[in-house]
Amino acid sequence: KAMHLMGASRGAHNHIIEEMSYYKEALRLKRLALNGGVEKDNNDDGDGNGGFDIENSSVSISDTLHCMGFSYDYTGDYQSALNCYEEALNIRTHLLGNDDLRVAETLHNKGAILCEEGDCEGSMECLDEAFRIRKLHHGEAHESCADTQQWMGNVMREWGDYDEALEYFKVALKVKKAKLGKTH
């Protein structure tokens, strides 16, 4: 946990390379602990999940992967970010279920990257599901729902459906104004 927190603190100060080294070490140590102290090669069983099965995973590992995805996104390394988000999502849905807010958070971030990468269909699938989960927990008039709807507007704009994009933007703005005030 200390390595994860060190990574998070370095990221807050824009030391991305150092941040990523802490996250990677945290991930290595967490996986090592779950594998009974046996170091495994990242590709040893070919399933792309870092040499351990999902049954031997933890929410803590998914949290570190999620943070790594966010950092990779910040640096513009979208493929690495997507890989981290996908692995975090697999762990989170397996351990926490499909309706957990951490699942929604990962889906939202993955959807945003897919939009940036031009995969509007994949993006909208992720964002729709993130919105469903957030709405289930918070109701529609919540900032996290507004954030997701804003990204849904971005997707619609990318698709060229400007009227639909505008509707998403209007709803997001209304919620944000109500929650944050007009001058925020």
Image (spheres, grey):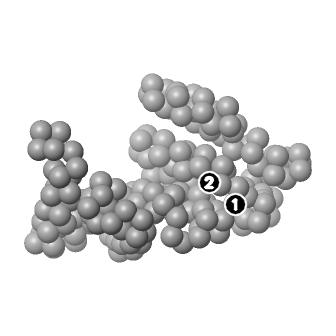
Q: Does residue 42 appear anywhere in the picture?
A: yes
Q: Residues within 10 Å of mark 1 (few under 14, many from 20)?
A: many
Tag 2: amino acid:
Ser
Measure the alpha-carbon separation of dots 2 and 1.
Answer: 11 Å
The answer to whether residue 90 is visible is: no
Residue 59 vs 133, above or below: the answer is: above
Q: Which residue is mark 2?
A: 62
**2 vs 1, front mark:** 2
Quadrant into which the N terminus falls: top right
Q: Residue at x 16, y 44 (%)?
A: 181
Badge number at residue 91: none
Image-quadrant location for residue 150: bottom left
- Looking at the image, do the residues carrying marks 2 and 1 touch, with CB atoms under 8 Å apart? no
Q: Residue 129: which quarter of the image?
A: bottom left
- Left or right, 163 with respect to 86, comes to left
x and y, in percent, of residue 148 in the image = 32, 61
Say left or right for 171 vs 16: left
Residue plotted at (59% across, 49% down): 63
Q: Nearer the viewer, residue 151 or 81?
A: 151
Vertical placement of residue 163 versus 63, above or below: below
Q: Earlier in the sequence, mark 2 or mark 1?
A: 1
* Residue kind at label 1, given as amino acid type: Asn
Q: Is residue 108 left or right of residue 103?
A: left
Q: Position of residue 122 (x, y in %)?
A: 40, 71
The residue beneath circle 1 is 49
Instruction: Say which element carries label 2.
Output: helix
Whether residue 40 sits left or right of residue 106 in the image: it is right
Would you place residue 156 above or below residue 143 in this image? below
Residue 99, horizontal then vertical, whole percent:
51, 70
Kindly identify the residue that appears in the image at 81 percent across and 52 percent down.
34
Q: Residue at x 66, y 33 (%)?
A: 3
